[in-house]
């Protein structure tokens, strides 16, 4: 299915957010996630189903002022 | 030392982690600054990215972290960013930025109050990036904020305290509220002035990170903050318009 990951098009076979993170190479990453502009806590990723066209944001700690 | 939401921090310097030439320079600048808080952000992560390495470096500083919502222009963006930051950093502290104008990076006062109320109600300890506007400050306190962070000048300008009268008035209007001058400082003298005015801390980034020698500038800020804090506690003299001789006139020789 075609989704958008951090603003770029991606294709995944995963059907949940948790599976998508593994498939996209974030399995070990310290990240926070949002689907369609809604925050999805880590504990809810397994139960969060993905649909065609969903927009994922995958964020990590960064420098800030 | 400043107390924010019941937590005393070790220094009135809150230092940003962006724009340093290297991680080693950042670490050395923090060491010499004696900073009490490190500010951080969250951004998009590439698959297999280095977010973990950055976080390990920040953890190595051994300081409380204050995540920000920098770059957010809407209440929704800021609130969602705060949720994600809380999970990533394991803190309910959030430096709340709701930007109202792209060029000035001036806070959007209406969105700021709305976001502050939502986040405070959810248990966040909100550090709002605001202006010197006293009415806005009152609204932020009503919304649940227990700290205020008025700007000195627009972010990244290094102009110092642009509206000393306004900041002095704000300080006098809410004498018991911990206040941090956030943004716009360029020189240690600006930080000293903030402390002399009775502010509790300063938050800065660019002035240290973009200095030719960030570590030396960091130490300069630390010393200036000490000087300003001591001066404020020492009850400074009142300024006056006309000169007043400090050397006694009594006993002055008549030589003409």
Image (cartoon, coloured by chain):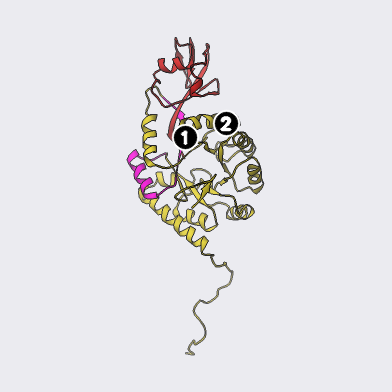
**Any idea which chain is the red one in this picture?**
A
Q: Is residue B152 in view from this perspective?
A: no
User: As drawn, is B11 to the left or to the right of B29?
Assistant: right
Q: Quadrant of residue B98?
A: top right
Q: Nearer the viewer, residue B63 or B166?
A: B63
In the image, residue A64 above or below residue B253: above
Q: Position of residue A31 (x, y in %)?
A: 44, 26
Q: Is residue B57 in view from this perspective?
A: yes
Residue position for label 1: B41
Circles 1 and 2 on the same subunit: yes
Q: Residue at x 63, y 47 (%)?
A: B133
Q: Position of residue B114 (x, y in %)?
A: 64, 35
User: As drawn, is B219 to the left or to the right of B184?
Assistant: left
Q: Earlier in the sequence, mark 1 or mark 2?
A: 1
**Any idea which chain is the yellow one in this picture?**
B
Q: Secondary structure at mark 2?
A: helix
Q: Nearer the viewer, residue B208 or B24?
A: B24
- Would residue B28 be counted in the magenta stretch? yes
CA separation in Å, label 1 and label 2: 14 Å
Check disc 1: other Cα within 10 Å, few if <14, some if 14-19, many if 20+: many
Q: Nearer the viewer, residue B22 or A34?
A: A34
Q: Residue at x 53, y 15 (%)?
A: A54
Start-end of magenta stretch = B18-45
What chain letter is assigned to the residue under label 1? Answer: B
Residue B79, numbered circle: 2
Residue B153, numbered circle: none
In the image, residue B136 above or below residue B111: below
Report how many numbered discs are placed on residues in the image. 2
In the image, residue B94 above or below residue B254: above
User: As drawn, is B216 to the left or to the right of B254?
Assistant: left
Q: Position of residue B27 (x, y in %)?
A: 35, 42
């Amino acid at each position: 299915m075609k989704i958008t990951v951090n603003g770029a098009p991606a294709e995944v076979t995963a059907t949940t957010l948790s599976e998508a993170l593994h498939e996209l190479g974030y399995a070990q990453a310290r990240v926070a996630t949002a689907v369609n502009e809604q925050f999805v806590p880590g504990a809810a990723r397994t139960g969060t189903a993905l649909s065609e066209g969903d927009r994922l944001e995958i964020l990590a700690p960064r420098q800030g002022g | 030392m400043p107390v924010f939401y019941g937590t005393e921090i070790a220094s009135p310097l809150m230092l940003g982690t962006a724009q340093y030439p290297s991680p080693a320079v950042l670490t050395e600048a923090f060491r010499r600054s004696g900073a009490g808080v490190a500010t951080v952000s969250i951004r998009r992560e590439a698959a297999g990215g280095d977010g973990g390495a950055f976080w390990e470096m920040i953890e190595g500083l051994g300081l409380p972290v204050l995540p920000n919502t920098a770059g957010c222009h809407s209440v929704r963006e800021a609130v969602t960013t705060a949720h994600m930051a809380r999970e990533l950093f394991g803190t309910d502290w959030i430096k709340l930025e709701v930007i109202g104008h792209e060029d000035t990076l001036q806070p959007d006062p209406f969105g700021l109050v709305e976001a502050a109320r939502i986040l405070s109600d959810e248990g966040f300890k909100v550090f709002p990036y605001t202006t010197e506007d006293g009415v806005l400050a009152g609204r932020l306190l009503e919304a649940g904020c227990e700290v205020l962070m008025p700007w000195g000048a627009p972010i990244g300008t290094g102009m110092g305290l642009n509206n000393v009268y306004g900041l002095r008035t704000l300080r006098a209007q809410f004498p018991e509220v911990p206040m941090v001058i956030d943004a716009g400082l360029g020189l240690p003298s600006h930080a000293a002035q903030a402390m002399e005015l009775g502010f509790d801390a300063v938050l800065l980034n660019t002035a240290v990170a973009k200095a030719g020698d960030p570590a030396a500038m960091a130490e300069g800020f630390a010393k200036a903050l000490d000087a300003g804090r001591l001066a404020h506690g020492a009850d400074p003299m009142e300024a006056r318009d006309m000169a007043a001789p400090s050397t006694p006139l009594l006993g002055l020789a008549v030589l003409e």
